[in-house]
Amino acid sequence: MHIMTGKDAVGGGLRERKKRATRAALAEAAVRLAAEHGADQVTVEAISAAAGVSVRTFFNYFDSRDDAFVVVDADASERVRQAFLAAPPGLPPLEALREALAAELREAERQHELWSLHARVLRSAPHLLVRNLGAQMADESGLAEAIARRIRAEDSSVPSEGDSGRAAPGLYPRLLAAVAGTAVRVSVQHWCERADEVSYAEVFREVFDLLAAGLPAPAR
């Protein structure tokens, strides 16, 4: 899941915070320029100038120009995993994941314009959309590992499926991670279409309430 927030929850000192701020400024500049001119027309030089840094600095954060369009917040997924693993013991996995995601997405509503611009950029550039989907799959895999780790830590009867010490997700962790990623994506899409009618928090809460209830059919 790749989202832009102003939240700083990964930790680190002043230097790390400045690095994250620079990366975020580059990603935002890239998205805004691509939305205005088209991704193929935007150069690394233009992105760097808009963010107020040098081209050399750009390549300290991104391996290529396209990376600036696709991965807009490299720390978001790690923050979700950390919050999920730190949730109170005994909290059901779905509830723990909902709280972890809610904490990360709390500021998202203020960035409706940027989210919409990013979605427009991806829709207009199929190769970027494919790369974005690949990045989401990688995030999903990491989340599944965190879910498996938490379940195993709370239930000693659940065996490890790997011999490297790294959580090896089974069916349930993979499914929950995939469902959570889809829930966030659908929530954002639904909210972006109706931002004047409903808050993102309301949409997000309704989506996870439906999941917790087993997705009952809507009342007619």
Image: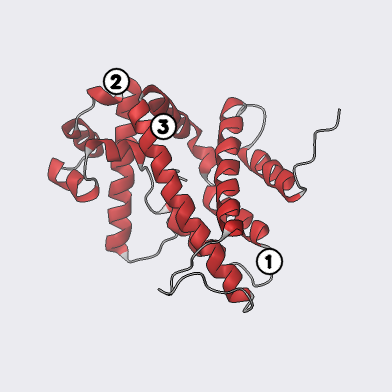
Q: Which of marks 1 and 2 is nearer the N terminus?
A: 2
172 to 51, vertically: above or below = below
Q: Which of marks 1 and 3 is nearer the N terminus?
A: 1
Q: In screen coordinates, is 103 left or right of 65?
A: right
Task: Residue at the far top: name it.
Answer: 37
Report x, y in % for residue 129: 39, 32
SS assignment at label 3: helix
Q: Dot 2: within a 10 Å radius of its alpha carbon, few (fewer than 14), some, or many (20 or more) residues? A: few
Residue at image position (47%, 30%) is: 113
Q: Mark 1 points at which residue?
A: 91
Give amino acid for label 3. His
Report x, y in % for residue 126: 37, 26
Report x, y in % for residue 149: 53, 69
Report x, y in % for residue 56: 13, 45
SS assignment at label 2: helix
Q: Mark 3 points at which residue?
A: 118
- Residue 158 visible within the image: yes
Q: Earlier in the sequence, mark 3 or mark 2?
A: 2
